[in-house]
Amino acid sequence: MNISEKTEEIVRNVRLINKIIHMKRHEIAQGNNLTLDQFHTLIYLKNTANPPTIGEMAVETKKAQNTISERISRLEEKGYVERIKDKNDRRVSRVILTGAGAELINSINYQASNELIRKALIDIEADVVDKMLYGLDELAKRLEEK
C-alpha cells in the first residue's frame, strides 16, 4: 500500500470512529430522556462564549423562535438550562446551561468516547495498543506542525 492509499485508509478510519462516537452520544442522550434537538441545544449552549437570547438561537439554528422557546422550556423543566435577565437590559432574557446540564453533557461525552474506546481497547493486545498510541501521537504532532 502506498502513502496515498494509507492516507485514505487513515482518514476513512478516523471518520468512522468519529461517526461511531457521534452515534453513541445520540444513543446515550436518548437514554437520558433527551430528544436529539434538545441534546444539540445543550451542546450549542456549552460551546457559546456569551449566553444567547432565544432570538439569537433561532437565527443560529435556522428555527422559528417559538420552536426554540418550547425546546428551552422543556430543558428548563428538566433543570438543564435557565433563563436569566441580561445584565445591560433587564427586558432581555438569555439562556444559560445549568450545572446539571453541563454535567450531563460532560457525562455523555465521556461515556461515548472514553468509555467506549476503553471497552474496545481491552480486547486488543497491549503492544498493538502501544503502537497505535505512538502512531496517533506522531500523527498529531506532525499535523500541529503543518
Image: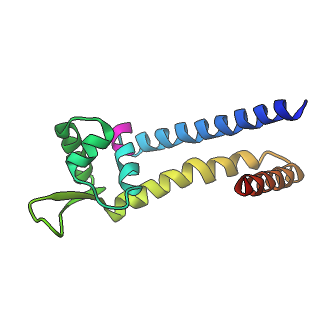
Q: Position of residue 85 (x, y in %)?
A: 16, 64
Q: Outermost residue, front direction?
A: 146
Q: Nearer the viewer, residue 35 or 18?
A: 18
**Residue pictured at 79% horizontal, 54% vertical:** 133
Q: Residue at x 40, y 60 (%)?
A: 102
Quick one: quadrant of the N terminus?
top right
Residue extending farthest left: 91
Q: Quadrant of residue 51?
A: bottom left
Give the residue at x 41% y 39%. 30
Question: As drawn, is 145 to the left or to the right of 76?
Answer: right
Picture mark count: 0
Question: What type of secondary structure mainly makes up the magenta span?
Answer: helix
- Is-magenta flag for residue 9? no
Please check the rendered image and state whether residue 37 is part of the magenta-colored stretch, yes or no: yes
**Left or right side of 98 for 142:** right
Q: Is residue 30 above or below residue 143?
A: above
Picture coordinates of residue 101, whole percent (x, y): 36, 57
Q: Position of residue 57 (x, y in %)?
A: 27, 46
Q: How is the image coloured?
A: rainbow
Magenta region: 35-39
Residue 41 picture location, percent across and down: 34, 46
**Residue that appears at 41% across and 50% down:** 43
Which one is nearer the viewer's eye here, 19 or 32?
A: 19
Q: Quadrant of residue 81?
A: bottom left
Q: Is residue 15 left or right of residue 29?
A: right
Residues 132 and 27: in front is: 132
4 in relation to 127, above or below: above
